[in-house]
Image (tube, rainbow, N blue to C red):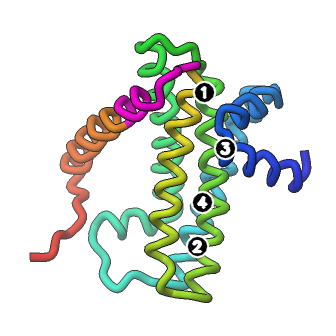
Amino acid sequence: MNFRDLGDLMVMTLRNPAQGVAMLRGLDLSMAERWLMLVLAVCLSTLLAGLARQLFPPSTEDALSAFLSVPMWLAVLQFGAMIVSAVVITVIGRAFGGHGTFEDAILLIAWVELILVGLQAMQIVLMLIMPGSAALMSMVAFGISVYLTISMTKALHGFESVAKVTLGFIGTVFVLGFVLSVIAAAFGIFPEVAP
């Protein structure tokens, strides 16, 4: 598979996530290759985050942003979050009658992250050319992330209803957000809130 094939697969995934899932499964990647894909996505994302931080240093820094400014911690956090996401997608999907596997969930999470890495690179370039576009690009990337996660989870498990998958996604985000806030509180990691 060359860069042109990757580009075609990316476009196909954005246009028709179910077909993108079928094509990814058709690659028949080994589990080691899927883990390698995940590690590559994390490394590229961490490198781009570090580059963005050097080019556009934050005006203020709280405990959370200071923690995330260390590349190793950011990479570990991203890697852990992706594994947790794959487990959650697999377990919750199967609890509702889906038939997706953890192996395929890892593949899809890694692929979505690689697509987001491409958007992250575009965001950095746009910020250099048009600094005011950063917020817009962030919203676009967030929207694409949610769209792909919901659509590919639906295809992964063979679900028919987008609405049910969306409700499951929203509920899971709230539960995970609560759990992560409790963990952050236990370690004393809080974003500072202006009075």
Q: Secondary structure at mark 3?
A: helix
Residue 139 picture quarter: bottom left
Label drawn at residue 45: 4
Amino acid of disc 1? Ala
Q: Residues within 10 Å of mark 4 (few under 14, many from 20)?
A: many
Give the percent coordinates (x, y) of residue 82: 52, 41
Distance of mark 1 from mark 4, alpha carbons?
Answer: 25 Å
Give the percent coordinates (x, y) of residue 194: 15, 76
Q: Secondary structure at mark 4?
A: helix
Q: Residues within 10 Å of mark 3 (few under 14, many from 20)?
A: many
Distance of mark 3 from mark 1, alpha carbons?
Answer: 14 Å
Amino acid of disc 4? Ser
Q: Which residues are magenta?
A: 158-169
Q: Mark 3 vs mark 1: which is more N-terminal?
A: 3
Residue wearing tag 3:
111
Nearer the observer, 12 or 42: 12
Label drawn at residue 123: 2
Residue wearing tag 1:
155
Image quadrant occupied by the C terminus: bottom left
- Of badges 1 and 4, nearer the viewer stands 1
